[in-house]
Image (cartoon, coloured by chain):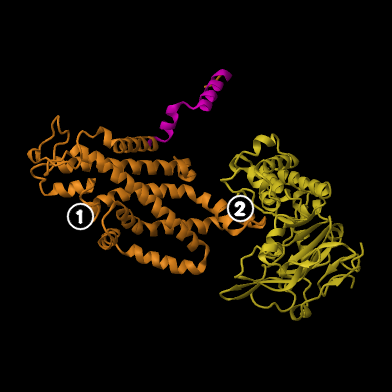
Amino acid sequence: MALTLAQIESRVDMEGRRPWWSFLRRHPLLVIGGGLLVIMALVALAAPWIAPHNPIDMNVLQRLKAPSAAHLFGTDAMGRDVFSRVLWGGRVSLIVGISVSLLATSIGVLIGMVAGFSRMADALVMRLMDGMMAIPGILLAVAMMALMRASIETVVIAIAVPEIPRVVRLVRSLVLVIREQPYVQAAEAIGTRFHWVLLRHVLPNAVAPLIVQGTFISASAVLFEAYLSFLGAGTPPEIPSWGNMMAEGRAVVQLAFNIILFPGIFLGLTVLSINLLGDGLRDMLDPKIARRL
Amino acid sequence: MDALTSSAARDAIVEINDLKVWFASRDGIVRAVDGISFDLLRGETLGIVGESGCGKSVTAMTMLQLIPSPPSVIAGGAIRYNGADLLTFDEERLRAIRGNEISMIFQDPMTSLNPVLTVGEQIAEPAVLHRRLDKHAARELAVEMLQKVGIPEPRRRADEYPHQFSGGMRQRAMIAAALACHPKVLIADEPTTALDVTIQAQILELMLNLKREYGTSIIMITHDLGVVAETCARVVVMYAGRKVEEAAAAELFSTPLHPYTQGLLSATPRLETAPGTRRADRPRLQEIPGMVPTLKGEAIGCSFAPRCYKATAICREYAPRLEDRGNGHVVSCFNCGSA
C-alpha cells in the first residue's frame, strides 16, 4: 500500500511527539513495577497520617478481632490494629530495601574496582568473596545479628554484607571488560590520570548493569528483612515490620489468619514491584536485550 | 636528501635507536620489536608497513609507553623526542607529553570513543587536561575542531553522543581530539583500516591537510601500501620485529630491494594490465609463501630466510646488517641490491 506524503509526515510527527502512553507501551514492566512501588512507598511514607490507630497501642478488649470497619485488617493477639501496623511496617521494608542496596553496591563497587585493576588484590579479594558466598546469606546475617544489638541499622548491615560478594563479582567482571576497551586506552594515550580514567571512563560505563543489580538486591533485602524478623533475629519487636507481624501471627494462625495474610500480601506486592522495575530497567538500559525485543 | 648526514642536520623530531621490546610469556621471551631504528623528521609523514604481528603497533605504543609492563619489557634502545630520551621519563613527565605533544589515533573509531560522554567533551579532553581549559572554552574548542575536520553543524554535533556518529565521522572526531592540543607528532595506528575505501580517501586527505596547517609530523602505521603511496614521504618496512628496508616512498615502489618488500608489492592487486589481455592471461596475484615466524626465542640468521626465494646458506646462519644503497635507501639483505 502506497502512502501519501502527508500520511508519512503525520506518522513521523507522531513518532517525534511521543504521546505519554508510548513509554508505557515500550516499557510496560518498568511502568507497572515503578507505579506499584511508588504507591507502596507513598503509603509507607504517609503512615503517620493515614494510619487510623497507633501501631503499638495495645487493647486487651480487642484481641484477635476479624476485619471490620473499625479495624480494616482486624487486630492481633495484643489487640493492635493490623492495618496501621502494615502501613508502618512498610517504612522498615522501604528503609531496609534502599539502604541495603546502596550500602552493598557502594562497598561492592570499591572492592570490585580494586580487584578488577590490581592483579595482586584480585586473587586475594576474590578468594575472600568466594569464601563469603559459600556461607548461606541467611546464616551469615543471623550470626551477625547475634553479635550486634538489634536495630534497623544492624539489620541493614547484616543483610548488606552477604550481598557484597555478588556486587564485587559483577563489578570486577565489568572492569575487566571495560579496561580493555579502546576508549580507555585512548584516554590513557592523551595523558589522563589513573583515578580520572576510573571515574570518568570506567565507572560510568558500568552504571547500567549496577542499577539493575541494585534493584534486585533491594528486592532480596526486603525479603531478607522479613526472614530475619520472622526468625526473631531481625527488627526489634517494638518496631512493627512485616516479618515481625508474621512471626507473631504464626502462633495464632488458626484463630486469626488475617494477621499473617495482610503483611504477606504487602510483602509479596513490594518484592514483585521491585523485581518488575528491575526487569524493566534491564530491558531499557541494556541495548543488547532491548534490541532483541 | 642525503641519508649520510647526521640526524641533527636532518632535523629529526623523533629518533628511535635500536629499540627492543620483549614480552615475557609462559613459554619464553617474545621479541616483538627486536632492535628497530628510524628517525621521524619535522613535518614529515613516515610510513611503517608490515604484516600483522610484525611489531608496528608495539613500536608505536612504546613511544608513549602505553603497553603494560609486565608483561612487556623494554630490553634496550632509546626513543629520543627533541633530543630527550622518553624511556627515562617518569609517569608524570610522560603524561605531560601524551596527547599534548605526541598524540595517537587508534584503528577502530567505533570503540575508541567513550559511549557515555558527548563527542564534544571527548574532543576537548586533551586540552582540558593539558591546558586547563574551562567548560566554556573547552566547548568552543570542540566546536572549532569539529569544524576543522569537516563535520557539518559542529555546534549541534558537539553535544551528540558517539552512537549518533557514523564510522567516518567518528574517525574525524578522533582526529579532532588528537589534534586539539596541536601536537608535534601524531601517531596514526591503522587510521583507515576500519573504514570503507571512499571514506579512507577523505580521512587521509583530511590528515594531510591538517598536517600542513599545524606542521605536525605523522607516523602512519599501516599494512595498506595504497595508504603509504598516497600519504608518506618515506617508508620503513618491518618484518618480525626488525626493519628490513627503508627508502623514500617513490623509490621503494619503483625499486624495492628486499625480497619481502618485493613480495608485499607483488601481492597488491593492480588495475592496470595491458589492454586487450584476456582474463585468463592476466598475471595471478602473487603471495608470499609460508607464515610469519614465531617471535619466541632468539632469531638466528635472517628472519625472512625461511620464506625467501633468494635465501642462501649464509642467510640461515647470520643476520644481515642494514646497508645503505645510496639515496637513503637502506636494506638488510645479503642477496639483493647492486650485486
Q: How many marks?
A: 2
Can you give x and y, in whole percent of width and height, for residue B127 in the image? Answer: 70, 49
Can you give x and y, in whole percent of width and height, for residue B216 in the image? Answer: 80, 53
Q: Residues within 10 Å of mark 1 (few under 14, many from 20)?
A: some
Magenta stretch: residue A12 in it?
yes
Q: Which residue is mark 1?
A: A232
Element class at badge 1: loop
Magenta stretch: residue A138 in it?
no
- Write down the quadrant of residue A149 in the picture: bottom left
State the hue of chain A: orange
Three-letter code for the amino acid on which mark 1 is drawn: Gly
Asked if residue B292 lies left or right of residue A283, the reply is right
The chain containing the residue under callout 1 comes to: A
Q: Nearer the viewer, residue B64 or B244?
A: B64
Mark 1 vs mark 2, CA separation in Å:
51 Å
**Chain in yellow (letter):** B
- Can residue B256 be seen here? yes
Three-letter code for the amino acid on which mark 2 is drawn: Tyr
Mark toward the start of the polypeptide (1 vs 2): 2
Which disc number belongs to residue B161? none
Asked if residue B212 lies left or right of residue B23, the reply is right
Can you give x and y, in whole percent of width and height, for residue B13 in the image? Answer: 82, 61
Element class at badge 2: helix
